[in-house]
Image (cartoon, grey):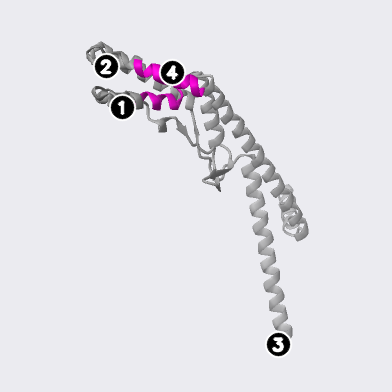
């Protein structure tokens, strides 16, 4: 008897749900849409905070902190719906994810180390001493250091690196050195990140969005049924 009464109660509950007034469904839908937008906004703000933490760690040149904050950002983005608006060449486009960002200071640090190692290798080979222009690295560094002080470049700014390779290339006997130096510089793309998020994920905002979509389809089906029924009744009455 208990099973029968429970079954009747379930049927009554389902019947009540399916007979909810359309205006009530529309009201619930409006509330869910507002809640979905709010949750998506919170996810975007959280992603922005985590991305800013990565960039702050990059400014501090703390490799361990960069890795930890980057992993935290990646884990959050992959498990949430991160709705973002990206501006590209004056045009705005909707994307899902962090959008592109660069670890500029880490690149500059690694490029500095690459230049230092390359210079040490060249000096070991005795190439610098044999150069008719003398120690060209010292001359290039003097010019670029002066430019850095004049224009306020941070040490080993990207503009400093460009200056370094440009000035080094002015010495005919150093063409091979310039090529070697450019070859050891790390690729910029290795320091570019663009973490994509799923279009839908079963997080809080994802579940709310899913419920809103179901109710929206429910309301549309009711509307289509009401319109088709009204047209059918009108045609029947007109036929009489």
At a point 69% along the width and 77% down the height, the residue shown is 231
At a point 57% along the width and 42% down the height, the residue shown is 201
Q: Nearer the viewer, mark 4 or mark 3?
A: 4
Magenta stretch?
139-165
Q: Position of residue 209 (x, y in %)?
A: 64, 47
Of callouts 1 and 4, the N-terminal one = 4
Q: Nearer the viewer, mark 1 or mark 3?
A: 1
The residue beneath circle 2 is 133
Q: CA distance from mark 4 to mark 2?
A: 19 Å
Of callouts 3 and 2, the N-terminal one = 2
Residue 111 in view, yes or no: yes
Q: Are marks 4 and 3 in contact (CB under 8 Å)?
A: no
Which of the pair 68/219 is nearer the observer?
Answer: 68
200 drawn magenta? no
Q: Which mark is residue 183?
A: 1
Q: CA distance from mark 1 to mark 4?
A: 22 Å
Of callouts 1 and 2, the N-terminal one = 2
Q: Nearer the viewer, mark 3 or mark 2?
A: 2
Q: Position of residue 150 (x, y in %)?
A: 49, 21
Q: CA distance from mark 3 to mark 2?
A: 105 Å
Q: Nearer the viewer, mark 1 or mark 2?
A: 2
Residue lying at the far bottom of the rendered structure: 240
The residue beneath circle 3 is 239
Q: Are marks 1 and 2 in contact (CB under 8 Å)?
A: no
Q: CA distance from mark 4 to mark 3?
A: 94 Å
Which of the pair 194/208 is nearer the observer?
Answer: 194
Q: Are marks 3 and 2 in contact (CB under 8 Å)?
A: no
């Amino acid at each position: 008897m208990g099973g029968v009464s429970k079954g009747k109660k379930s049927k009554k509950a389902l019947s009540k749900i399916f007979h909810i007034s359309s205006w009530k469904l529309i009201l619930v839908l409006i509330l869910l849409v507002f809640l979905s937008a709010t949750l998506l906004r919170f996810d975007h703000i959280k992603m922005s905070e985590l991305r800013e933490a990565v960039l702050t760690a990059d400014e501090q040149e703390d490799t361990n902190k960069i890795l930890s904050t980057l992993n935290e950002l990646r884990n959050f983005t992959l498990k949430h719906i991160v709705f973002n608006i990206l501006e590209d060449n004056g045009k705005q486009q909707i994307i899902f994810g962090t959008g592109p960002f660069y670890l500029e200071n880490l690149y500059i640090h690694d490029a500095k180390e690459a230049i230092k190692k390359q210079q040490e290798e060249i000096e070991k080979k005795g190439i610098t001493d044999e150069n008719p222009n003398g120690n060209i690295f010292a001359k290039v560094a003097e010019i670029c250091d002066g430019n850095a002080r004049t224009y306020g470049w941070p040490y080993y700014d990207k503009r400093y690196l460009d200056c370094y390779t440009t000035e080094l290339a002015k010495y005919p006997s150093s063409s091979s050195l310039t090529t070697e130096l450019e070859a050891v510089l790390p690729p910029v793309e290795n320091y570019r990140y663009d973490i994509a998020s799923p279009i839908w994920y079963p997080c809080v905002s994802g579940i709310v969005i899913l419920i809103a979509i179901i109710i929206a389809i429910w309301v549309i089906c009711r509307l289509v049924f009401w319109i088709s029924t009204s047209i059918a009744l009108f045609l029947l009455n007109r036929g009489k």
